[in-house]
Amino acid sequence: MEDPKKTEEAPVEVPKKEKKPTKAELTAAEAEAFEGKDTDFFKVQDEETKKWAYPGPLPVLSRAAAVSLGFKRFYTGVPCKNNHDCPRKVKGGCVECGHERLKAYRTTKAAEAKAEKEATKTEKKEEK
């Protein structure tokens, strides 16, 4: 006799990876905006003011469209959670948020290195 506690379970289906959309699957506006263009949303420096900014109005593009067109960055037109209105990386994250994280990391690493250097100096003085 079979154990009533054991029931046959259906096999678990593993979700399939999403395919990259083809150019035909892009919206008409996205395809027209980038037809024949090879742009990658980088800041440029204004010669007169010497300030960095994104050139002109950035065309709104979905992540799927950016991936299928081979771009590294895209612009959604919606600010990120930290209210940055700038392009996003296809691999994930806002460009400005990435710059802020890197700056914070560098300052903490510099402070740690300075503290370690001071500790090494005091150790050497105590040894003498």
Image (cartoon, rainbow, N blue to C red):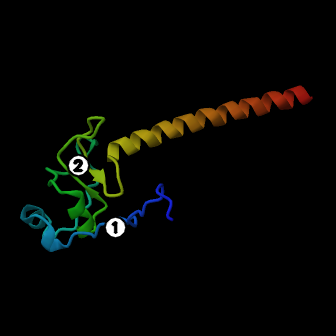
Q: Which of 26 and 32 lies nearest the eye of the viewer? A: 26
At horizontal 47% and vertical 59% (from top left) the residue drawn is 6
Tell me where residue 87 appears, x and y as whole percent: 26, 50
Furthest toward the front, the residue is: 1
Compared with 109, 125 (above or below) is above
Q: Quadrant of residue 32?
A: bottom left
Q: Is residue 115 left or right of residue 74?
A: right
State the mark number for residue 17: 1
Q: Which of 124 and 89 lies nearest the eye of the viewer? A: 89
Tell me where residue 78 appears, x and y as whole percent: 19, 43
Amino acid type, mark 1: Lys
Q: Is residue 102 left or right of residue 81?
A: right
Number of numbered discs on residues: 2
At horizontal 36% and vertical 57% (from top left) the residue drawn is 91
Residue ID for mark 2: 54
Classify 10 Å Cα crowding around label 2: few (below 14), some (14-19), many (20 and above).
some
Tell me where residue 57 appears, x and y as whole percent: 13, 50
Tell me where residue 29 appears, x and y as whole percent: 7, 61
